[in-house]
Amino acid sequence: MHNELTKRQREALEAVINYVEKINYPPSYRELGKLIGLASSSTVSGILNRLKDKGFVSWEEGQPRTLRILKDAS
């Protein structure tokens, strides 16, 4: 199924959801990387791009902290 998530994608999505619930705005790539144990911003970017392709998140290109959750993994 196209919308199935890998373990890492699910971890990232859940981390973003929890972060937004606590802080009221989305994490930066660096902050998200720390939350899920990744040092590489490009790896975080790749995960978020796959989540976007699968319809779980969206953002405004070139605008910081515009990441939006479209649906959760449940």
Image (cartoon, rainbow, N blue to C red):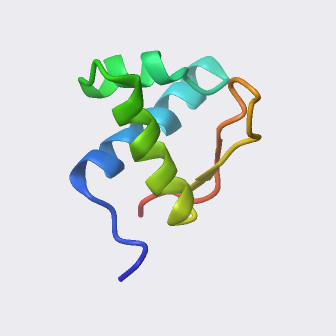
Q: Is residue 57 left or right of residue 39?
A: right
Image quarter where the N terminus lies is: bottom left
Task: Please tell me how many numbered marks the rendered image carries.
Answer: 0
Residue 21 locus on image (x, y percent)? 58, 30
Examine the rendering and report whether any part of residue 7 can be seen: yes
Q: Residue at x 49, y 24 (%)?
A: 29
Residue 42 location, quadrant: top left
Name which quarter of the figure residue 43 lies in: top left
In the image: residue 18, left or right of residue 35: right
Say which residue appears at 33% left-offset and 62% top-offset: 5
Percent x, y for residue 52?
A: 56, 55
Is residue 4 depicted above or below 14 in this figure?
below
Residue that appears at 28% across and 18% down: 39
Locate the C terminus by quadrant.
bottom left
Residue 6 vs 40, above or below: the answer is below
Q: Is residue 13 in view?
A: no
On screen, residue 25 versus residue 9, left or right, reads right
Q: x, y percentage for residue 45? A: 46, 36
State left or right for residue 6 relative to residue 27. Answer: left
Q: Is residue 12 above or below residue 23?
A: below
Where does residue 28 sit, x and y in percent of width and height? 55, 20
Q: Name the residue at 38% across, 40% down.
A: 12
Question: Is 29 drawn above or below residue 7 in the view shown?
Answer: above
